[in-house]
Image (tube, rainbow, N blue to C red):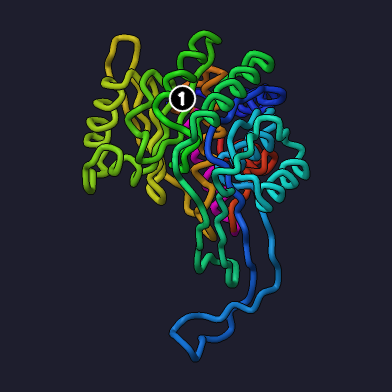
Amino acid sequence: MLTIDKFSVEKLFADFTGMKVLVIGDIMVDSYIWGKVERISPEAPVPVVSVTKRENRLGGAANVALNIQSLGAVPLLCSISGNDQKANEFSQLLEKNHISSSGILRSDKRITTTKFRIIGNNYQMLRVDEEQAHALTQPETRAFYNHIERIALAEKPHAILFEDYDKGAIDIALITWVVELAERLKIPVAVDPKKKNFSSYKNATLFKPNYKELCDGMKIENIQRTPEELLKICSGFQHFHNIAKMILTLSEQGIFISSINKFGVAEGAMIPARIRNVADVSGAGDTVISIATLCTALNLPLYDTAFISNIAGGLVCEEAGVVPVNKEKLLKELLNTL
């Protein structure tokens, strides 16, 4: 049940300002080729995109950092990139967006992940990925641990957020160590998981998979999207891994939430999506986990957290490409809704 009102949501958004979130995960460059489609190629049955603009944006964990910043909070981004031209472009993007690059390590053993998207008439038509997803070397791992601990102890974040894209920055040892660090600091841990480490986030506070990630992670094909079945699957996972709160994004169906109360009883609810003109779903999950992490750090009830996150995720879907949420636009829609 929704407990927030217009006054409390305005106070909540004001409280976001100045909060610090340590974001750990896989970073990437989102590279876009924009253009117009007016004909089909004579060489193959594919559209011809006449290029009008090229653009690079922050992607992966860096887009989460951008969302956190757009909400008025301070992202403390920790990751590892290649030592290449794309890494230089990534650093320039961080500087342009006033996000510190002090938590980014460079490695000669990997390339900087880049996702190339071709956008025709404001709709995504093709994506090409350039990446290396192997695990960190031992020297890289030691340096990464030291980096994270130094930043966490110096900056005293209000929450830690894992943004896992299965690109090699995160493994089970790092997860275990960071969760223990968060327990010492008495701050929540939020997780945006992928398949490889799906079942490794024991003792996390908030877990946010999408439907495909849940099916892949649980190794169950086509989980029924009924509240009863979703609560059974989610709460079972939560009990086994000691995870208090879960937000499951269901695309056009909205969001399902599952929480374990102090008596160990699971409670679930479905929050429907709003009808929107969807241009691109890329990055919507980043927006959801960013809002949800800040709300969790401020001890907002899970239903209220998911309600706000659901609206925020829908808003960014109306934009082409990966974009951060607009705080003022989100607040205005919430005030018109409550």
Please provide percent x and percent y for residue 114. 57, 54
Please provide percent x and percent y for residue 239. 27, 20
Please provide percent x and percent y for residue 33. 63, 66
Residue type, numbered disc 1: Leu
The quarter holding residue 54 reads bottom right
Where 196 sits versus 182, above or below? below
Q: Does the magenta portion include 316?
A: yes
Q: Helix or strand or loop: what does disc 1 sit on? A: helix
Q: How many other residues sit within 10 Å of disc 1, few (<14), some (14-19) or many (≥20)? A: some
> What range is drawn magenta here?
305-320
Q: Is residue 39 left or right of residue 98?
A: left
Image point (46%, 13%), residue name? 180
Q: Residue pushed farthest bottom?
A: 42
Quick one: quadrant of the C terminus?
Answer: top right
Image point (57%, 27%), residue name? 144
Image point (62%, 58%), residue name? 31
Q: Main secondary structure of the magenta part?
A: helix
Question: Which residue is disc 1 drawn over?
Answer: 174
Image point (57%, 67%), residue name? 118
Q: Is residue 275 left or right of residue 224?
A: right
Give the camera-side residue of 308 and 165.
165
Q: Is residue 106 among the parts visible in the rendering?
A: yes
The quarter holding residue 122 reads bottom right
Please provide percent x and percent y for residue 136. 49, 35
